[in-house]
Amino acid sequence: MMTPKSEEIIHALELKSSTKQFIYRKTKEVFDLFRVEIKSIVSEVGPAIHQKDKYIEVITKDSGNFETEMQFSGDTLLFMMHTNVFNFPPDNFVHKTNYIKEDPMRSYCGVINIYNFLSDSLRYGRMNDVGYLIARIFINKEGHFMVQGKRQFSFMYNDITQFEINPAAIRAIIEEAILNTISFDLFVPPFDAVKEISLGQKINDTGNTAIKTGKRLGFDQSED
């Protein structure tokens, strides 16, 4: 005979686990739409820029079910879907909206992260190099979404109650990420940040640079 606790467990699984599984599938659908839009942009921009400068490549490739890359010249955007579903902290503003108060399960979201790496970091396997988070996209069970990031991403899609994901929004996010990355220059690091290198680094990184490379290493990124 089923106990009250067993019934409570079943109800909790039905409410949360089923919803999380649905959000996972929804996020995967959205991620696949990102892949479609990335390929569309590459097919448009790649040939056009190649006519102007044959040395500039704009290409894309998939790296498994949850990663895809978009390379343009010296930069690569890495789109990564997280396989877990998240909720926002209790003090986050989303919990204060009527949209979430009406149905608290609307605050659970899948996440797609966009990182900027130097193309050479990936090409030469420079394990010490770092990438930077450009933006992260949160998608809930109803296809509502919001974006967290800096610059335009700080206000572009910042209200999960208003925006529903669609191909036009996905393309706008990708295009903004590209423009953000192009304007995000590789600066010479401070002298003291690279003045030393160990022999172990030199031996282990023969053929590559033993110095960690990133666009803002040693710099304050508060304005980026």
Image: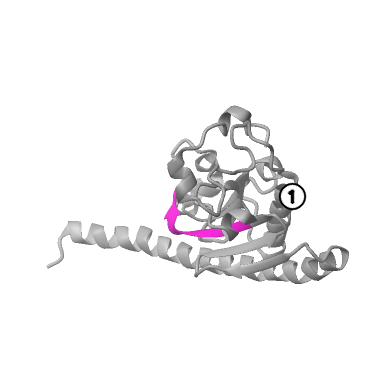
Where 218 falls versus 201 (above or below)?
A: above
Quick check: is 56 in the magenta stretch?
no
Q: Amino acid at mark 1?
A: Ile
Between residue 73 and residue 136, name the one nearer to us: 73
Residue 160 shows in this picture: no
* Residue sitting at x 64%, y 51%: 162
What is the span of residues highlighted in magenta in the rendered image?
77-87
Residue 1 percent coordinates (x, y): 12, 68
Residue 161 location (% of width, % of height): 60, 50
Asked whether residue 55 is in view, the answer is: yes
Image location of residue 139, percent across then percent down: 55, 57
Q: Is residue 84 magenta?
A: yes
Magenta: predominant secondary structure element?
A: strand
Locate residue 128, reporting x and y percent.
50, 47
Report the residue at 69% width, 70% height from top: 39
Of all residues, the one furthest to the right in this rendering is 52
Q: Residue under circle 1?
A: 182
Rate crowding at label 1 as few (under 14), some (14 to 19) or many (20 or more) other CA atoms within 10 Å.
some
* In this picture, residue 75 sits left or right of residue 79: right
Which residue is drawn at the image coordinates 24% and 57% (left, top)?
A: 8
Q: Quadrant of residue 165?
A: bottom right
Observer-nearest of 210 and 134 = 210
